[in-house]
Image (cartoon, grey):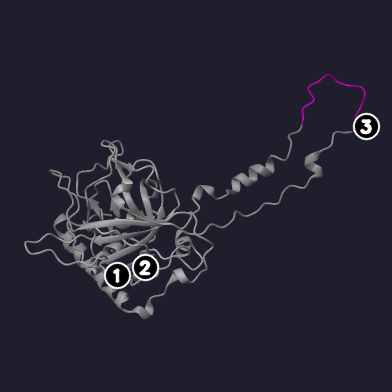
Amino acid sequence: MTAPNAENERNTAESAADGVAAAAVAVEIDASSDVDVAKQTAPSGLRQLPMAEEKPKDEDLVKKTAAGVSAPESDSGPESNAGPSATPKADVAAEEPEPAMEDPEPQMSPAEFLSKQFLPPPGAKRLSQESLLWVDRKSNRVYIDGYVAIDRGALEMFACPVGSKEHESIVAVVAKSSEVHAALLVVGAKTGTTAMFTPNFVPPTGQAIRVWVSWRDKQGKFHVEDARRWVQDTETKESVEADWVFAGSGFYKDEEDGREYYRADGGDMICVSNFSTAMMDLSLASSADADSLLFRPFEGRVPERGTPLRLILVPIPVPTDGPPPELTPEQDPNVKPQESVLPVREGEGK
């Protein structure tokens, strides 16, 4: 597989993304096609996502079963003329039936789990039936549901699609990077360029995007925080201050099947290390070298792993020579979203 020439890459990305955005607008306008997966299943309660390692393993069950069978004893003592004992030693393993093998309890997928936690954000439209992603053109907001993937360790991403780079991302979300790209275009955000490394480093550009993260604790209490406060600089020990920018990633063509693929769908959705494939990236120099990663989850601020959450992405208006635009509180990227963005089902915590 080879990437397109650098001079053609941006044009290809923009035209393809515009096509995705047009489809997204059609979905957004056609409310009759908006099927709400979140309403299809009654909730079992607001809880933490079961992590993969908690799932029972077949080999563990095999080991437990085998442990009940004792190994034969060797006759290492002197020969005895007394003959066999009149009261032979009881063979417990023979008398007690072996426990039946049981299939591990099936585990819900992240999409199934998250669809049970929250109702859709009011006033927003579902972008696709495969993702938990909504757009609100009136408020210029994009909403994405996900969960806390890690709460410690080195970071390359703040957020990634489920099934990609959870081992180095604070948040995993049920949406593709290309879908989030399209959603940002729908609410008017403008793409820029990804980071360049040769001959000299050039940081990523694009419209700045404020990222808010909202969640409810186990008591159902609402919380909302600027996502940058969840990312700690390993040198200064402070939270990151730079904004994320809508770099826009790009496309590459697979020579085997002739199709074009969006680069950031591999995991590089909202990055904290600079990547030439980033959909969103920090507007500063941040190494992606494993030995020089600059950021980690801010312990004490990030909820425990598995906590369900909703991201709110709000474009920051581009500075102009004229007067700043008049914004509603919902459109203002510096105003914390209210509790109404994260409604729970009837009977859940409020």
- Closer to the N terminus: mark 1 or mark 3? 3
Q: Residue at x 31, y 56 (%)?
A: 212
- The residue type indicated by label 1 comes to Asp
Say whether residue 22 is visible. Answer: yes
Labels 2 & 1 near each other (Cβ < 8 A)? yes
Residue at mark 3: 86
Our reading of the magenta stretch's main secondary structure is loop
| Residue 208 image point, x, y percent | 20, 56
Judge whether 274 appears above or below 82 on screen: below
Residue at mark 2: 121
Q: Which of marks 1 and 3 is in front?
A: 1
- The residue type indicated by label 2 comes to Pro
How far is mark 1 from mark 3, CA to CA?
Answer: 85 Å
Horizontal side of 222 relative to 3 (left or right) equals right
Q: How crowded is mark 3: few (under 14 residues within 10 Å), some or many (20 or more)?
A: few
- The residue type indicated by label 3 comes to Ala
Q: Quadrant of the C terminus?
A: bottom left
Residue at mark 1: 136
Count of numbered circles in the view:
3
Say whether residue 249 is visible. Answer: no
Magenta-colored span: 73-87
- Closer to the N terminus: mark 2 or mark 3? 3
